[in-house]
Structures are given as structure tokens and as C-alpha cells.
Image (spheres, rainbow, N blue to C red):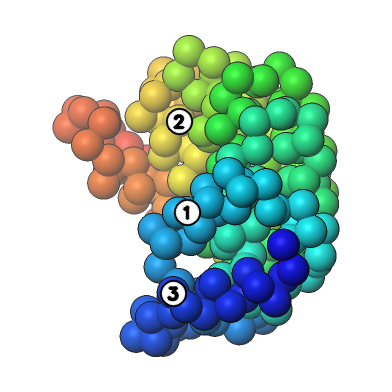
């Protein structure tokens, strides 16, 4: 399908009030906003995949509109072949310039191919590119906590050094979630103050807000804040 036709379909779904709200919520992107709600973008992505009309759209980068980037992320998330999916992820990541597109790209096939995914995660985390690093840490958080956790994964996230807000926030999100799912293994990172001060304290804040962490654990974590 011609990209102009896809943009027409996006414009037909426009909500101008939502557009204005989104543009304030996601100020870091250079893309323009049409104003299509996430639920409509997910629906359109499924329709395009079913119609077999995604190849041309995925190949033409960069996109002009934020909504196109979101649609792109949702289409990638629906690719069922691992090799094809990771190829499209790697082609798209250099153009991801905001937290929303980064965080909402969550390929379902990755859950089934964890072993094959790890080398890519390691590469993404070491890339030095804000949203590629964030995406890599997000994939560790989604797929390698709980029963799939190994201490080396937490070390990999802790070793990332950056002044970028969206990287530090993902580090905090990762460790807060890790505390909820692998408390005993991850607690030493907090006790030993392994993380940078802001990230350390943000991790504790987010962990304390979690319903998955006990009151006793929360009380102890509060004592570990860095003043």
C-alpha cells in the first residue's frame, strides 16, 4: 500500500483534542502529530498486517508523523517470524526518538525466542543511543525477570552510565520491577548503592509505589535512600 494512502487512513482517525494532549505529553519527538488514539493505531496495524500491506510502509523511513512511528511499532510487534521481526526492529530503532514509541514496541515473538533475543539485547544496551539503550533494558525487564532472571542481566543494566533522563528512568523502572519479582537477588544493588544517586532514589520511590512489594520491604527500602 502507498504510504500516502496510510496517511489518509490515519487522518480519517484524527482526534484534534487528543493530538494537542499528546504533543504536550511527548515533547522530545521531532515528528508532527495527527492525533490518532492508541487503540485505533493498534486496530489499524492489525488490519494492515491481515491485508498484507505493510512491506512498503516499513521500508520507508524516516516517517513524518508520530502516529506513523506508533503504527510502525505496532506492526513490528505483530510480526510472527523472529528473524524478520528483529531485522525490522533493528532497522527502525535508529529512528525512534521518544519514550512512547520505544516502550510500546513489544514484539510478541520475543517471548518465544528468549535465547535468540539475548545477543541483540546486549548489543542494544551497549549502543549508546538513548532509545535503543532504553529498548534493550525494556526487553530485559519484560522477558528476563522472575524465573528467567540471572544476576548478569541486572549487572548489565546497572553498568549503563548516562545522563539521559529516559535512560535513567528506564534503569529505575527496571530495578523497581526487579525488586518486585526478584527481591533477594536484586536488593544488594540497592544496599551497595550501585546505581547513580538519582536513579537509586527513583528506584526506591517506584518500588515503594508498587503493590507487589510488601510493607516490610518498603519500610526497609526507605532507609536506603541517599540524602
* Residue at figure coordinates x 54%, y 72% from the top left: 9
* Residue at figure coordinates x 26%, y 31% from the top left: 212
Q: Name the residue under label 2.
A: 178
13 with respect to 102 (left or right): left
Percent across and percent down for residue 12 are: 47, 78
* Labelled disc at residue 42: 1
State if disc 3 and disc 2 touch (CB < 8 Å): no
* Residue at figure coordinates x 56%, y 32% from the top left: 108
Q: What element carries label 3?
A: loop
In depth, the one of 205 and 148 nearer the eye is 148
* Residue at figure coordinates x 42%, y 35% from the top left: 177
159 with respect to 207 (left or right): right
Q: Name the residue under label 3.
A: 13
Which of the marked residues, 3 or 1, is nearer the chain's N terminus? 3
Q: What element carries label 1?
A: helix
In depth, the one of 171 and 94 nearer the eye is 94
Residue 183's place in the image compared with 131, above or below, is above
Percent across and percent down for residue 11 are: 52, 80
66 with respect to 37 (left or right): right
Percent across and percent down for residue 215 are: 17, 32
Amino acid at each position: 500500500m502507498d504510504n500516502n494512502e496510510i496517511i489518509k487512513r490515519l487522518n480519517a482517525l484524527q482526534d484534534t483534542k487528543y493530538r494537542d494532549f499528546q504533543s504536550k505529553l511527548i515533547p522530545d519527538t521531532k515528528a508532527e502529530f495527527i492525533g490518532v488514539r492508541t487503540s485505533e493505531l493498534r486496530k489499524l496495524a492489525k488490519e494492515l498486517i491481515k491485508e498484507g500491506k505493510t512491506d512498503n510502509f516499513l521500508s520507508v523511513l524516516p516517517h513524518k508523523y508520530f502516529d506513523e512511528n506508533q503504527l510502525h511499532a505496532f506492526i513490528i510487534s505483530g510480526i510472527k517470524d523472529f528473524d524478520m521481526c528483529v531485522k525490522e526492529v533493528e532497522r527502525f530503532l535508529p529512528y525512534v526518538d521518544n519514550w512512547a514509541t520505544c516502550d510500546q514496541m513489544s514484539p510478541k515473538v520475543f517471548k518465544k525466542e528468549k535465547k535468540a533475543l539475548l545477543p541483540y539485547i546486549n548489543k542494544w544496551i551497549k549502543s549508546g543511543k538513548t532509545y535503543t539503550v532504553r529498548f534493550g533494558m525494556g526487553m530485559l525487564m519484560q522477558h528476563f525477570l522472575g524465573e528467567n532472571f540471572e544476576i548478569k542481566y541486572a549487572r548489565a543494566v546497572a553498568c549503563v552510565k548516562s545522563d539521559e533522563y529516559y535512560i535513567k528512568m528506564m534503569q529505575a523502572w527496571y530495578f523497581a520491577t526487579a525488586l518486585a519479582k526478584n527481591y533477594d537477588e536484586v536488593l544488594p544493588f540497592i544496599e551497595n548503592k550501585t546505581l547513580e544517586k538519582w536513579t537509586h532514589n527513583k528506584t526506591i520511590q517506584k518500588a515503594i509505589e508498587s503493590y507487589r512489594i510488601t510493607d516490610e520491604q518498603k519500610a526497609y527500602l526507605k532507609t536506603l535512600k541517599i540524602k
